[in-house]
Amino acid sequence: MSKETLLITAAVSLQILQTLGYMVEPSSMQKIHQMLLFTHDQVQIYKDWLKAPDCSTNFIAAANKKTTGTGMWIIEHPKYVEWDNNGGLLWIQGKAGSGKTVIL
C-alpha cells in the first residue's frame, strides 16, 4: 500500500468519525499520520529484504572470473555428451565454491 493510499485512508477515516459526531484532535490526527508513515516504511523495509537478488549480476561476475580453457573436460564426459545430444536435465553437483557456476 502506498503512502498516498494510507494518507487517503486516514483522511476518509477522519471524515467518517467527524460525520458520526466524534471530534478528532489535530494532535491525534498527527499521531495517526506518523503511525501510518512508520507502517509504510516498515513494509517497504520487509519488501526490500525479501526481494530476490539479481542472479544475472552474479552470473556475469562469475563468468568474468573464468579462466579460458579450464573445464573443457566436461564437454568430453559421457554424461555431458549424452545430455548435449538428447537434451533434458544435466545435474552438476559439487561443494560450494568449486566452480559450478563458471564451468561453462
Image (tube, rainbow, N blue to C red):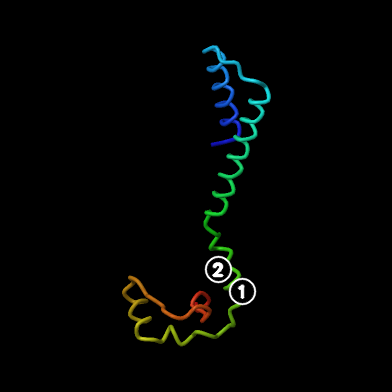
- What is the secondary structure assignment of the residue under circle 1? helix
Residue 24 coordinates in the image, percent (x, y)? 61, 19
**Mark 1 touches mark 2? (CB < 8 Å):** no
Position above or below: 62 against 21: below
Residue type pointed to by label 2? Phe
**Figure label count:** 2
Q: Disc 2 designates what residue?
A: 59
Label 2 neighbourhood size at 10 Å, few (<14), some (14-19), many (20+)?
few
Residue 65 coordinates in the image, percent (x, y)? 61, 77
Position above or below: 57 against 21: below
Q: 69 or 92: which is nearer to us?
A: 92
Q: Which is nearer the N-term, disc 1 or disc 2?
A: 2
- What is the secondary structure assignment of the residue under circle 2? helix
Q: Disc 1 designates what residue?
A: 64
Residue located at (44% from left, 81% from top): 94
Q: 60 or 87: which is nearer to us?
A: 60
Q: Quadrant of residue 87?
A: bottom left
Residue 62 coordinates in the image, percent (x, y)? 58, 73
Q: Quadrant of residue 15?
A: top right
- Marks 1 and 2 sit apart, C-alpha to C-alpha, by 9 Å
Label 1 neighbourhood size at 10 Å, few (<14), some (14-19), many (20+)?
few
Residue located at (52% from left, 13% from top): 20
Instruction: Name the mark on residue 74.
Output: none
Residue located at (55% from left, 12% from top): 21
Position above or below: 14 against 104: above
Residue located at (62% from left, 36% from top): 37
Residue 4 coordinates in the image, percent (x, y)? 60, 31
Residue type pointed to by label 1? Asn
